[in-house]
Amino acid sequence: MKIELTSEEWKAIMAPGAAMTEEVIRLNAERVRLEKQVDSLGRDCASRANDPRIYTKDQLTNALSVVCAYLSAGSKISAIKHVREITHLGLKEAKDLVEGNYMPTPPRY
């Protein structure tokens, strides 16, 4: 049995496949764009690796535990000094940070 289809019927049958092909092309272009963005971020992070304001998760956790230990011992001045040492903030900003009244903005690069 041979089936004859009109061009409109062929278009109707092929439309989902064509739409999927277009979606694959769009997603591939998006993947390429995101890969370029990730590469750019990687280069940016590598260029800031020696910045004294950039800390690893372990360094930040350790610094926070030191500040908490100072505060639990009742030594707010030592906690402020430690915050100033690790953040390079001024005295007022570090005091406000220790007292919970200040949230510094991240540095701009």
Image (cartoon, rainbow, N blue to C red):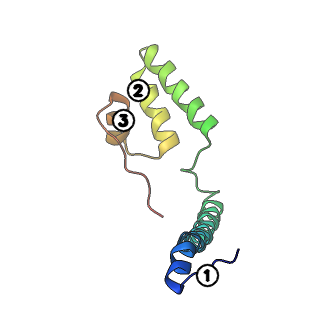
- Mark 2 Cα within 10 Å, few/some/many (few <14, many 20+)? few
Residue placed at 53% from the left, 86% from the top?
7
Label 3 is placed on what type of residue?
A: Leu
**View extreme (left): residue:** 101
In the displayed structure, 4 sits above or below 102; it is below
Residues under labels 3 and 1: Cα distance? 78 Å
- In space, the residues marked 1 and 2 are separated at their CA atoms by 89 Å
Q: Nearer the viewer, residue 27 or 19?
A: 19
| Mark 1 or mark 2, whichever is nearer to me | 1
Q: Which x, y percent locates residue 33?
A: 57, 71
Q: Residue at horizontal 42%, vertical 52%?
A: 106
Q: Residue 30 location, x and y as percent?
A: 56, 69
* Element on which disc 1 rests: loop
Nearest to viewer (mark 3 / mark 1): 1
- Left or right of 105? Residue 55 is right
Spot occupied by residue 27 in the image (x, y as percentages of width and height): 57, 68
Q: Report the amino acid beneath label 1.
A: Glu
Residue 77 numbered mark, or none = 2
User: Of 100 and 3, which appears nearest the observer?
Assistant: 3
Judge by depth and name the residue closer to the eye, 49 or 37. 37
Rendered-image quadrant of the N terminus? bottom right
Closest to the observer: 27 or 7? 7
Residue underneath mark 1: 4
- Label 3 residue SS: helix
Tag 2: amino acid: Ile
Residue 90: x and y in percent read 38, 45
